[in-house]
Every structure is written in C-alpha cells, then in structure tokens.
Image (cartoon, rainbow, N blue to C red):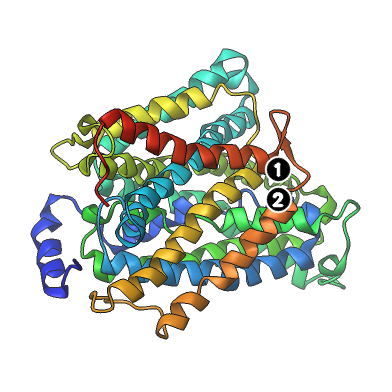
Amino acid sequence: MGVSRSSSATLGRGRRRSGKLRLLPLIAATYFMVAGGPYGLEDIIGKAGYGRALAMLLVVPLLWSLPTSLMVGELASALPEEGGYYCWVRRALGRFWGFQEAWLSLAASVFDMAIYPVIFVLYLGRIEPVWTAGIRGTLWALAVVAACAIWNLCGARAVGDASIGMFCLLLSPFVVLTAVGLWRGMGAPHPFAAMHGRVAEEDLAGALSVALWNYMGWDNASTVAQEVDEPQRNYPRAVFWAVGLVALTYVLPLAAVGLAGIPADRFSTGAWTDAAAQLAGPWLALCVVIGGTINGFAMFNALMMSYTRVPYAMAEEGILPKALAATTSRGVPWVSVVLCSVAWALALRLSFERLISIDLVLYGAALLLEFVALVVLRVKEPTLVRPFKVPGELWGAVGVGTGPAALIAFALWAARGERLAGLPALAFAGIVALAGPAIYYAARISRKRPATE
C-alpha cells in the first residue's frame, strides 16, 4: 500500500535527528550517481565536434533525463522504500521481474564500478607517475574501494555531506576554465569558428552513445529512500535540480573551450588537463588533475551507497540470505557493503575495458522495466497516493517512456559492431541478462518452495 503524506511526514520528522539525507546532500549524491563533472565528455567532442556535441548535450536531457526524472519523481515519492527501483518493479510486476530488475542493475554495476578507482589512479599518476607505477596502482585502487566502504558504513548522511564538499572541489577548476575560455573566445575575431568545424574521424553514433552514458543513473538515489528526510517531498526536487546541474556543468565548459578555439580533434580521454594548461597554465592543469581523482572517488562513493541497498532489500523479502539484511546502528546494510566491495575489488583485476554499450544495454533494460512499472501501477493502483505525478493520465505515463525507449534502441543499433571477450557486445550483454532468469529459478528450486507472487 502507498504511504500517506501525513505518515511520511511523521516518519521524516521522527528520523531527522538520526542522520537522514536532507535535500542538498541528496542533490549532491544524485549528481555523483549520474555525473562527475565534465570528465568523460572528451570523447563526445573528439567524435562529433563542438557544434554537434553541444546539440547532443542539450537534446539528450530532454529525451532521456527529463522523462526519466519524471518517472523517478512519481515512483520514488509514491513508494519511498529501501531498494527503490527493485521495489517498484516487484510491486508492479511480481517477484520474478523484481529479481530481474535487481540482477540487471547489479550486473551493470560490475562494468561500471570498476572504472572509478581506475580513474582515480590514472589522474593520480599524472601528478606523480612513480606513485602509481606497477603494483602501486592496484593498491591505490583497492584503497579507494576500502575507503569508500568505510565512509559508507558511517551512513547515508555522511556520504551525502561529503558529496557536497567534493562537488565544490571538483568543479572549482572548471569554473576558472570556463571563465577564461569564454573571455578569450568572445575577444577573438571569429569566436564561433571552432563550433562549426568538423573532426577528422567523425563518429556520431559513438558520440551519442557516450552522451547517453554520461546522462544515465537518475534512478540510483531511489534505493536509499528510508535514509532520506521527507522522501516524498525531496526526491522529485533533488532529481530535477540534479538534471539542471548536470546539463549546466556539461554544456558550459564544453562551450568555453570551443569558443577559445581549441581544436576538437585534440579531445580524447584526459584532454581537459591539456585544455586547462593551454588556457591558464600548469597550475590550473594540476587542479583539473586533482579534480579527476575526486571524480573517481566521489562517484564510486555515491554509487556504492546506491547499489548496496538492493541486495539488502532482497534479503529483507527472503529472496537473498537473511545475513545480507544485517545493519549497523545507523541503518547501513554492512554485510551488503562488504560483499559488494569485495566483488568490485575483484573486478579491478579483470582485463576488459568498460564498454559503454554493455552498460547501456543492461541499464537500459532495467530502466525500461521501471517505465513499465510506472504504467502498470497506474492501472493496478489508481488510488495510490502520488505526491508527485507525471502529467496526464495513462497515456502520459506511457508517453514519458517513448524517448528513453527510442534512445535505448539506438544504443543497441550503435553497439552492433562492438565485441567483448571474443563475442559481439550485444550477445555478451544478452548472455548476462539471460543469466538472471536462470539464477532466479535455480534459487527457487534450491529453496524447495514456490515463490509467492
């Protein structure tokens, strides 16, 4: 059943003193669950050029981020439960599909989470290469995993408060870079010349896939609902504020370096450091490098908080072993934090590079289940209290998912030529996805009792 406004407000007031995430920390944590500043945009510029990159970064939020945030706003405010999207899909579609939602999300995390400690190490190595040489790089990556696990054990509020500080530190070099770039660009004879230029090796499909990847993750904050102060009120506000912040912190630095005349062909992973050195000198380049280490740490820290609540919610319902439901005095599922940390630490040693197509396929499938849950709950539970509601009745709920569905279909098409571990990327993602039903039924047989739908 839905939670009423009054009962939710009472719950929020009763837990404020116990360390709940309030609005500003929730916005900062949501930001890091989606983005980590402009880091990661370099390949969009290098593949598409400035003009098309800007167009993508402005259009994708309208077709992808806004519809997803509307869906998350309705479901998170109507069903503010620990486990978030897993609970929405399970309530709407039953235990089987709830399990698939959790499986797809956690499987995608393997491809996603291992990269953030590596980002930390890569940028740390640019400060002093000897610090990360040889085995030291692996030890630093493991240290990031361990430090984030300890930080998460301090509670959701500790993660949210840290996200505010790291948000300010990470973006401060880009404030300077943007200001200098715009100043130089507007004083140039032809400030918009670079915006119309083409790149030598254009790859618009690849650029759009990278743009989608940089805008995904809006549902991640939903999993900590019971650790958020007044979730029915704060979730919709946090998601919409984060959408604006992500778009702003993507578009402005990109426009600034374009107006400053830095050729788009120079942009690939890590090129923000070179752009900062060219525009303001080595001191700003160093600040951007330090921001890169913050990017890796902060994203891993926030996403750890999100993903570890999914096994906890499943254990609470008896789908996973009850040990995973053990919590600290702050309500942190510590067994889940430890086990997930170990799994991600083991993934650091895998030889594969993160493939954006794999992330998009697995995450996209999970996201589509959430949009289906939105529609089904409108039909099954029309009287469910919805403090925030997607505009329109049933067709509004259906229509809001069309943009994301079309973009996910495009991502599938764009990934048709990619390979991983000797297999086509789509086939590899399909095998991972199909393992979900197999694991579900194997677990059901092992329990020797039928699952209650």
Q: 27 left or right of 118?
A: left
Q: Secondary structure at mark 1?
A: loop
**Residue to which mark 2 is pinned:** 42
| Residue 9 percent coordinates (x, y) | 14, 69
Q: Amino acid at mark 2?
A: Glu
Q: Nearer the viewer, residue 22 or 173?
A: 22
Within-10-Å neighbours for mark 1: few <14, some 14–19, many 20+:
some
Up the image or down, 368 lies above or below 291; here it is below
Q: 21 left or right of 391?
A: left
| Residue 160 percent coordinates (x, y) | 32, 50
Q: Are marks 2 and 1 in contact (CB under 8 Å)?
A: yes
Q: 252 left or right of 14?
A: right
| Residue 8 percent coordinates (x, y) | 15, 67
Q: Nearer the viewer, residue 205 or 96?
A: 96
Q: Amino acid at mark 1?
A: Thr
> Which residue corresponds to the image point at 64% horizontal and 71% vertical from the top-left?
58
- The image quadrant of residue 69 is bottom left
Q: Nearer the viewer, residue 234 or 284?
A: 234
Within-10-Å neighbours for mark 2: few <14, some 14–19, many 20+:
many
| Residue 207 percent coordinates (x, y) | 73, 56
**Which of the two discs, 2 and 1, labels the residue nearer the N terminus?**
2
Q: Does the image show residue 183?
A: yes
What distance separates the C-alpha of mark 2 from that of mark 1? 6 Å
Q: 129 left or right of 141?
A: right
**Where's the N terminus, which quadrant?**
bottom left
> Which residue corresponds to the image point at 61% horizontal and 41% vertical from the top-left?
429
Q: Nearer the viewer, residue 83 or 379?
A: 379
> Which residue corresponds to the image point at 55% horizontal and 47% vertical from the top-left?
362
**Residue to which mark 1 is pinned:** 269
